[in-house]
Amino acid sequence: MAAHSVWWWYTAVCIFSIMGLMMSFYIVEKTYIPLYNRPYSKTPGKLANARTRQSASTARSTVTSTISPVVQTEQMREVTLHCKMVCSKSAGDICVPLDLAVFVYKNDTPTENMTFNQYHYPVVRVASASNASNESLVLEVERCNLEEHFPEVELIPRQPSCAVIGNSGILNNSSCGDFIDSHDFVIRANGALIKGYEVDVGKATSLSVINLTLLLKYGRAMGNTNTTENLKIRAQFLDRVRTSNIRILWYPKHLYQPGTHCDYCGKYRSIIDGIRKNGFTGIRFAFSWKGIHVEKAWGLHRTATLGLDMYAVARTFCSNITLFGFYPFYKDLEGRAVKYHYFDDVKFNFSRNRGHSFTGEHSKLKELEKQRKLNLVVRDCKPREGSRHENTVREPIIDI
Ligand SMILES: *[C@@H]1O[C@H](CO)[C@@H](O)[C@H](O)[C@H]1NC(C)=O
Ligand SMILES: *[C@@H]1O[C@H](CO)[C@@H](O)[C@H](O)[C@H]1NC(C)=O
Ligand SMILES: *[C@@H]1O[C@H](CO)[C@@H](O)[C@H](O)[C@H]1NC(C)=O
Ligand SMILES: *[C@@H]1O[C@H](CO)[C@@H](O)[C@H](O)[C@H]1NC(C)=O
Ligand SMILES: *[C@@H]1O[C@H](CO)[C@@H](O)[C@H](O)[C@H]1NC(C)=O
Ligand SMILES: *[C@@H]1O[C@H](CO)[C@@H](O)[C@H](O)[C@H]1NC(C)=O
Ligand SMILES: *[C@@H]1O[C@H](CO)[C@@H](O)[C@H](O)[C@H]1NC(C)=O
Ligand SMILES: *[C@@H]1O[C@H](CO)[C@@H](O)[C@H](O)[C@H]1NC(C)=O
Ligand SMILES: CC(=O)N[C@H]1CO[C@H](CO)[C@@H](O)[C@@H]1O
């Protein structure tokens, strides 16, 4: 009987010790953070925001009691920081979710240095209480410092007001140009034509977003083959760049899947090189930390449109957002025909497109408008010639 009881205690102690060792692979608040704060940490006190994993915290008492003899030999080991937010002092102390972060390369970054490091969490070296396992440690961190952990890029600073411009024909004849340009930051999609439409769509382009089709098309054309077709596309693209006053060009989707070859980096670099070699040296280039995908967060069953991605990202740095040219219908509020794009005559059937849910997204935007999270402009900003409203100078009506 006595022998049995001793055996039982021996087993229990062993199990607890093993559990304790296993738990120490995660970082435990009490035993760990002070170590991180020692001189070999580049930022003392930074982990004040650290949030350890639930499993680690609940096991704390076990760990502290059973691990303590091992803690004496400190080792340096690598820890991956899973940052929830990334914060930048030089961008006015802004913090944005890492998943939605727009990383803008510094202007002096040579094209060949642009590796578009997507999906890479920062890794830091810290003193470890145990090297019992060579499994990598992960630390869930609320905030990571951009200047320290992502030194090659910058964030877009906080903006008081942003205009996000969709390409709907609702902008046609709208005279919204001045109103659009009055915003601090203007986001446009897919190299939308501006020249000739300034009165309706404005001139400013703070952020120009391109989709995969255009990344491939322009990337190929800017590469080094001089076929007639490529020369034509190249000229068209450079003309777009020249006439749209782009400050930052941004490709928002994944350039490579985690752990694989960077499929699209070469295309993006060709575009960047082409733009720079043609004298547009003031344009900056941006990528996302992670390919932007807001479907899950927004409860969408189909792929979000680029327009929705633009809005979702704008929310991370704009205080007041106004959407223009988001209108997936064929008639405007006064019954006039609306084209798919304000700049061409492409025909489009919204309900036949299986890729996106235009009306679903529109309802979502209307809902957000009710919650005052955005302003949706779907009317003219000034009365049209020959319109029955000609003599009433209307304020833009920001609600349907
Ligand atoms: C570009 O990369 C090289 C080597 O990878 C490095 O020495 C150089 O400092 C980098 N230049 C800039 C401006 O980041
Ligand atoms: C940690 O690993 C080193 C060799 O990599 C070994 O010499 C040392 O004894 C180990 N320490 C512990 C506590 O396991
Ligand atoms: C730990 O390191 C050894 C030798 O370097 C390696 O064979 C083993 O796969 C590693 N284990 C893990 C979990 O990474
Ligand atoms: C705007 O509407 C007027 C008539 O109301 C028309 O003459 C003009 O061509 C239109 N312009 C554009 C750019 O749609
Ligand atoms: C990308 O944008 C271009 C220009 O607006 C458009 O023709 C193309 O269909 C878009 N590609 C995708 C995959 O949506
Ligand atoms: C293509 O033409 C450009 C000038 O327009 C020239 O600089 C480049 O070397 C040419 N490339 C090839 C492969 O012919
Ligand atoms: C937000 O922007 C819209 C349009 O630019 C403007 O009408 C509105 O007053 C602004 N709201 C706030 C709270 O600044
Ligand atoms: C769009 O397609 C649907 C079904 O394919 C059709 O019923 C509808 O009339 C079309 N709408 C337009 C404006 O062409
Ligand atoms: C609905 C609408 O106003 N359509 C106009 C858009 O612009 C073209 C010219 O670019 C006009 O021809 C259309 O009438």
Image: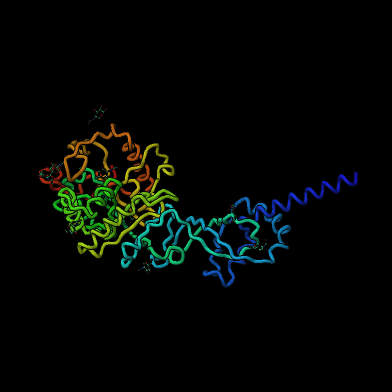
Horizontal side of residue 217 vs 67, given as left or right: left
Q: What residue sits 15% from the left and 50% below the top?
A: 232
Report the front residue among 173 and 212: 212
x%, y% of residue 220? 25, 50
Locate the C terminus by quadrant: top left
The quadrant where ligand 9 appears is top left
In the image, 136 versus 398, the foreground residue is 136
Kindly identify the residue that appears in the image at 51 percent across and 61 percent down.
123
Q: Residue furthest bottom?
A: 39
Above or below, 157 relative to 219: below
Residue 119 locus on image (x, y percent): 44, 53
Does residue 179 appear anywhere in the picture? no
Position of residue 27 relative to residue 229, above or below, is below
Q: Quadrant of the N terminus?
A: top right
Q: How many marks?
A: 0
Give the quarter of the image for residue 204: bottom left
Q: Image height check: is 365 above or below 88?
A: above
Q: Looking at the picture, how far across and down is residue 84, in whole percent?
A: 48, 55
| Residue 111, x across and y down, in percent | 31, 62
The quarter of the displayed image where residue 140 is located:
bottom right
| Colour mapping used in the image | rainbow
Residue at image position (81%, 50%) is: 10
Q: Nearer the viewer, residue 36 or 173?
A: 36
- Residue placed furthest toward the right: 1
Q: Is residue 389 left or right of residue 77?
A: left
User: Residue 232: in sight, yes or no?
Assistant: yes
